[in-house]
Structures are given as structure tokens and as C-alpha cells.
Image: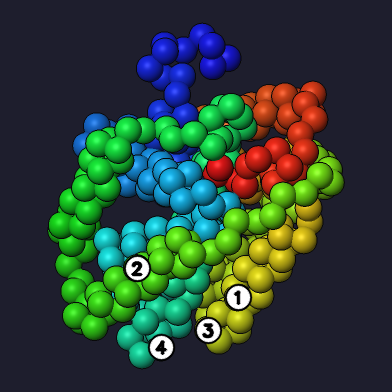
Amino acid sequence: MISRLPSWMRTPAFAALVLAPAGTELLTGNMPPFVFFFPPVLALVVVLYGGGAIIAHELIVRWGKGWPSLLALAIAYGVYEEGLLMRTFFDPQAGDIKPSGDYGRFYGVNSVEVLRLTMFHSVFAILIPLLLVSFLFPGKRRESWVSPRTFNILAGLILLELPIGWLLRSYRPSVQSYLLCIGVVVALIGLARVLPAPSSTNEAGRGWERRLVVQGYFANLLLFLFGWILPAAAVPWPITVLLLIALSIVVATRVIRGRFATEGLLALAAGGLGFYASAGPILELIGRRGAVIVGIIALFLLVRLGRRVRRTTVLTPEAAGICLAA
């Protein structure tokens, strides 16, 4: 399928520029197709999400790191977007479904928004797109995808989106809030730089299994339940926070200890994407026009992905010389 595309589109960088915003905004219903494909909006999300994914990959390759560093960079990206760019971490009116503006607020911070949005963007904007690209271009997993000049341009464009974010939201948090987010982002990038890469192993990991797809689906279902439904139901916010923390720990532990081959990780990712793809009719009912068509296309591609993966045999990411993004 990739071989039929023009040569300039058959690159991992282009795939990341497409997959990151499509999975984060289009498939999830955050942006209906007529909004997503509006040229100015499309340019903004391609640079923000796709550029962020490419930058994370490039840093991992330059530093010779693996998935622990990638995870730190993914979290840093989530903090940058929602803490500095959109400022939903602090805006009392932020959030799609809330019984009141003070739900989960603790010392001026929206604790529920911090957890659910950081988890969401880390996974859907960085981790899953890079995992998909590593499968589509297995020979380029440990290679640089862009030139140093392009890397610098992408980084500059992402920073230039800060003023646009400030225009989109009138809320202005305190200077201390900005400094806190900047400090967290810098600390996470520094952590990614010093974290050791996982040691190699010759043991085979678990490949594509249907139950892994189901687990990925229900993990995202729980994220939706804890992050959106419980606040709407006015469940005491400390319970929601504890459940979100528990979910993140369980998922991280499952991935770390599961010894998954690349196919296994893709099965988990396919389950997470499948959750939103199957939610197309519901999204359509709440006004996200075009969500059904997007969901059908996504499900079709996920089924093709599963069939292709089951025909291959891959060792663990470490044994194959890759670690998610590498």
C-alpha cells in the first residue's frame, strides 16, 4: 500500500506528520473532519502533533536511548501542550465535561485535567504514532528521519504556536504556573537524556494476540470513564484522581513486564485506537459530523494492520534493536 504513494509521501517523517494529528484529533472526535481539514487548522495540528512526534524520535536516535526516555519525552510533550500552550491545567473552565469549574482544583491546578490529558497526549500524540511508524518503516527505526535544519524548523514552529494558544484561550494563569510547567518540561527532557536504554535480550516476546487488542480497548475505555464520565457524575474528585493514577500505573506495569514483541505493542495500540473508531456513531449523535466515516476507515485500516502483523514474526523490541521509537 505504501509503495503506491508518491516518493515524498513514503517517508517515516511524513507518516508521523499524518498519524499523530489524525489519531489525536480526528479519530477521537475532538475535531470533526470539516474542522480538521480546514487548511489553517490542519497546518497547526500537523506541526504541533506531527512535529512533536518527530522531535521525540530524533532525540531518542541522537541520544541512543529507548522507551524509558521516549516515555519521559511523551509526558513532557503533554505538559507543554496542555500546561503552556492551552493552559487547561490551570483554567477553571477547562475540560469538556464538568459539573462545575472547580472540580478537581487543588491550589489552582486542575488535577483531573493534568492526569487525563497528560496520559491521553502522551499515548495518542507521541507513543502510538511512533509505534505505527516503526512498523510501517522497520528499517528506519534507529535512523534519523529529518535533517538537523528541519528539526530546528519544527522545534521553532512548535514554539511559535504558543502565541496562537494564548489567543485561543483568554485565561491567563499566574507567572508561577508558567514557570512550573517550564520547569517540569525541562526536567523531563533532562531525565530522558540521562535515563539508560534497556539492555538487549535474546528472548522472544509476546506477539499479536486478540486479547491484547481487547486489553488496549478497555484501558482506553477506563481512561474515558475515569477522566470524563466520573467528573460529569460529580464523583468526589480525589477518587477520580486516585483511579487515574492507578490506571496509569497498571498500564505502565503491564507494558514493562509484559515482554511484548513489536506486534504485541501494536495490538495494544490497535485496541486503544479501536475504542474511538467504534465510538463513531456516538460521536456523530453528539454533533461530530463525519465521525462514522472516520471510524469505518480507521477500523478497516486496523484490521489490515492486524492481518499484516500476524503474518510476521518479530523479536522483542530490545532484541530487534528497537525500543518503541528507535
Secondary structure at badge 2 equals helix
If you read the primary sequence from the N terminus, does the residue marked by circle 2 or circle 1 appear first?
2
Crowding at mark 3 (Cα within 10 Å: few <14, some 14-19, many 20+): some
Q: Is residue 140 above or below residue 157?
A: above
Q: CA distance from mark 2 to mark 1?
A: 22 Å
Q: Which residue is mark 2?
A: 186
Amino acid marked by disc 4: Phe
Disc 3 versus disc 1: nearer the observer: 1
Q: Where on the picture, by quarter, is residue 206? A: top right
Secondary structure at badge 4 equals strand
Q: Is residue 192 above or below residue 277?
A: below
Quadrant where the C terminus is found in the figure: top right
Along the horizontal axis of the image, is 85 left or right of 310?
A: left
- The reply to whether the C-beta atoms of the residues labelled 2 and 1 are less than 8 Å apart is no
Crowding at mark 4 (Cα within 10 Å: few <14, some 14-19, many 20+): few
Q: Where on the picture, by quarter, is residue 274? A: top right
Query: Which one is nearer the viewer's eye here, 326 or 83?
Result: 326
Q: Which residue is mark 1?
A: 245
Q: Which residue is mark 3?
A: 237
Secondary structure at badge 3 equals helix
Tag shown at residue 106? 4
If you read the primary sequence from the N terminus, does the residue marked by circle 1 or circle 4 appear first?
4
Disc 3 versus disc 4: nearer the observer: 4
